[in-house]
Amino acid sequence: MGVINAINETSSKAFDSGETYIKVSKEYYKLKIFQQLTRFFSFFSKLAIIGGLLFLGLIFLTVSGAIWLGQLIGNTALACLLLALTIFLFTGIVYLIRKKIDKSIINKMSQEFFN
């Protein structure tokens, strides 16, 4: 009977250890998910605030540049057209390199997520 009791006790300890491991792992993954979600929302909140302010600055810069260029060439409508074409040119360049931008974002996000 001593062997059976020893096996029973050992299997109970193994079961308890496994149960503890599962509970600790569950808590770890909860914390890991919480960490990743807070990083994600923090990143996109900062991105929205900084991006919004940069966009607002770009609008004012474009308007003031159009006014200045209009005074320089003597035609405000032509100046606005030139600035619009310049913005479309930059947009086209970004469109052409969009796959490189996607790869860069995926690499950066995967490093953040999986580490």
Image: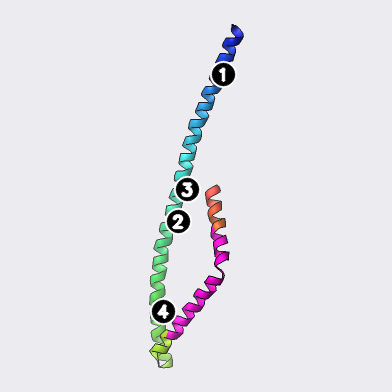
| Rendered residue at 50%/27% (across/down) | 20
Q: Which residue is mark 2?
A: 43
Give the label on residue 36, or none.
Answer: 3
Left or right: 66 with respect to 101? left
Q: Magenta stretch: residue 31 in it?
A: no
- Give the alpha-carbon distance from disc 4 to disc 1, as whole Å: 74 Å
Task: Tell which circle, 4 or 2, labels the residue nearer the N-terminal end.
Answer: 2
Q: Secondary structure at mark 1?
A: helix
Task: Tell which circle, 4 or 3, labels the residue nearer the N-terminal end.
Answer: 3
Whether residue 45 is situated above or below residue 9 in the rendered picture: below
Which amino acid, by three-letter code, is at mark 1? Ser
Front disc: 1 or 3: 1
- Give the alpha-carbon distance from disc 3 to disc 2, as whole Å: 10 Å
Task: Tell which circle, 1 or 3, labels the residue nearer the N-terminal end.
Answer: 1
Range of residues picked out in magenta: 81-105
Q: Residues within 10 Å of mark 2 (few under 14, many from 20)?
A: few
Left or right: 92 with respect to 72? right
Pinpoint residue 69: horizontal percent, then vertical percent.
43, 87
Q: Which residue is mark 4?
A: 62
Whether residue 113 is situated above or below residue 70 in the rendered picture: above
Residue lying farthest right? 3
| Rendered residue at 43%/57% (across/down) | 44
Q: Which residue is mark 1?
A: 11
Predominant secondary structure in magenta?
helix
Which amino acid, by three-letter code, is at mark 3? Gln
Which amino acid, by three-letter code, is at mark 4? Thr
Which amino acid, by three-letter code, is at mark 2? Phe
**Residue situated in front as seen by the camera: 62 or 3:** 3
